[in-house]
Image: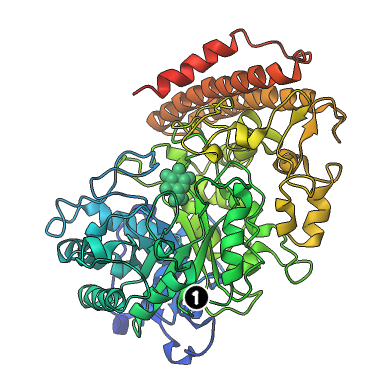
Amino acid sequence: MKGLLGQPVPVVAANAGKKQGGIILRVANAANVSVTDPTAQQNREGYRVFVEQRNIVVSGPTDAAVLYGTFALLRQIQTRQPLTNLALTSTPKIQYRLLNHWDNPNGTVERGYAGSSIWKWYELPELLDPRYEDYARANASIGINGVVINNVNASARYLTPEYLRKVAALAGVFRAYGIRVYLSVFWAAPKTVGGLPTSDPLDPRVRRWWTDKTNEIYQTIPDFGGFLVKANSEGEPGPQDYGRNHAEGANMLAEALGQHDGIVMWRAFVYKANSNGDRFKEAYEEFKPLDGKFASKALVQVKNGPIDFQSREPFHPLFGAMPSTPLVLEVQLTQEYLGFATHLVYLAPLIKECLEADTYAKGKGSTVAKVVDGSLDNHKISGIAGVANIGSDRNWTGHPMGQANWYSFGRLAWDYTLSAETIAQEWTRMTLTTEPQAVNTIADVLVKSRDIYVRYTTPLGLHHIMGQSIHFGPEPWLSKSARPDWTAIYYHKADSIGLGFNRTATGSNALALYKPEVQKEWGNPQTCPPDYLLWFHHVPWKQTMSTGRTLWNEICYRYYTGVDSVTWMQQRWEQVKPSIDPVLHADITARLQIQHKEAIWWRDACVLYFQSFSRQRIPAPFTQPDRSLEAVKQIVDIYQMR
Ligand code: BDP
């Protein structure tokens, strides 16, 4: 309040609160919250902010609720909303609202684009960087109540007493902000840490080891949140190494959690090595048969789409297909496939697109959001996870606008009905400027930015055509890799006839994983939304689309206008210059320049490469790129040089 009002605000004890004209923080009603109510946990976090006599009262049943209410009040003030007749009431729609850090013990971050990890393992537990508290406060301000602090490609180190003390030190900082700590576990830890000959989940020694280890964790961290597991995925060990399935693995950990108040989040991001099917279908085929076999403390964590955090994916077919299992939605805030920390891409529209998608699992209106919040299938627990874009950068996220993605994730996890526009406005006002015209301009750029990114990189449902190791650059010609499903040609299937992956009944039939209503819409190239077209159809270059252009012309149109739209973003950003801190303005101006350069790079790489199949000219008014495909390939090679 002092910072916002520019004058000191005295803090007085509760019983001195008889005077009027202040803010009262009141923990009340705790007794009324029923523990058998499925939404009890969320109710414990819900708040009310209202006016009583001449005071503003922030009330809720727990400290955390009052904290969330306090941040809601601050948001109200900071975004300059009226305070008269204030009546804010809000309860989170999803119970576990988690950040997943992909941070390693050596201080690097898997796919992290904001510098190195913010956790300083060699200084912990004695030295606590003040940023830990800033981080926790920022999370609490947007309602995040848990953090998985280490990479899903996990190190066993975190399960040693030495490291558990370090984790406990972080938990100690986060506790006051309503945030619990979780760990990603390395499946083979019973062997590497425990010295056992096996990590078979059905082996009694292994079970004993996990139970003892879990008890030890709770002795060190009494409010420990639980485990996140990546198993039998991309080379990580798992229960299948012993002929056991994912549910048997998850249930063993759930059993180890016993009476402790913790959960297991078991990731469904799996696809077999050397599979000759369609990677799109693999997680579904492995997990769908396990529905109903998971213990009550186990949730299955599913990425928003079936492949891997592409700039646009159809919703994952597991949503709506596992009614007996609570599913955690996993989205990626770090912009691995969306331009790293150099491209301005606001992700709320992407997250909402998934949440609002209709699975038709129980008829119309069975949205992914209703699957995830547990309401569709009456689950007692629900969760959502965002892969964090936070690092050691002074501005936290590398791209200053990346903060908007951290912010919007928290806001949507709390209330997914908020619009991407509202959140963009809120964030802009609280972070950049309150000048109304500038706010509108910036929010408009934010809201359009994701579609613009899709246009100049992967329009019409193209996917996975990025550089093998530089995921921010194009490599549609990539034809050899350690696995076929790591190449680009596996996905775009360009040939002299056309472009796109036929996933209809005449192709891989991945479409059959969806409910008939969805199949009907996407299965016909005429009714399939153009944004998903090449996800499901191999379309002839000369085919006329709903836009009136042929596929080839439409592709070109999107790549070229996508680049022009980056110019538009640059112009908009220039317009708001008088309202923005000069250093920040210059930073983003420079990043937009990089974005523009790389948009042209994507466009040239893709139109030149696909032109070698379509054998058609670039349609007017656009002109042939002024460099050759070979020249573009060289840039990619340079970035991928050892
Ligand atoms: C992929 C990333 C890889 C992650 C993997 C995962 O490239 O670094 O380990 O996802 O989610 O997108 O496990």
Residue 241 shows in the view: yes
Front one among 159 and 409: 159
- Within 10 Å of the Cα at label 1, are there few (<14), some (14-19), or many (20+) other Cα atoms? many
Residue 490 place in picture, x, y as percent: 61, 36
Q: Identify which residue, 585 or 21, lies in the foreground.
A: 585
Q: Which residue is mark 1?
A: 46
Place of residue 69 in the rendered image (x, y in percent of width and height, measured from the top left): 45, 70
The answer to whether residue 527 is above or below residue 47 is above
Left or right: where does residue 334 sit relative to residue 201? right
Residue in the picture at 44% in, 63% down: 240
User: Residue, x 45% and y 53% (percent of image)?
Assistant: 233
Quarter of image, res 459? top right
Q: How is the image coloured?
A: rainbow
Q: Residue furthest left?
A: 126
Name the secondary structure under disc 1: loop
Q: Amino acid at mark 1?
A: Gly
Residue 251 location in percent, x, y?
43, 76
Task: Using the image as rendered, state which of residue 588 and residue 76 is in the foreground.
Answer: 588
Q: Is residue 239 left or right of residue 383?
A: left
Q: Residue at x 69, y 28 (%)?
A: 494
Q: In the visual, does 8 lie left or right of 549?
A: left
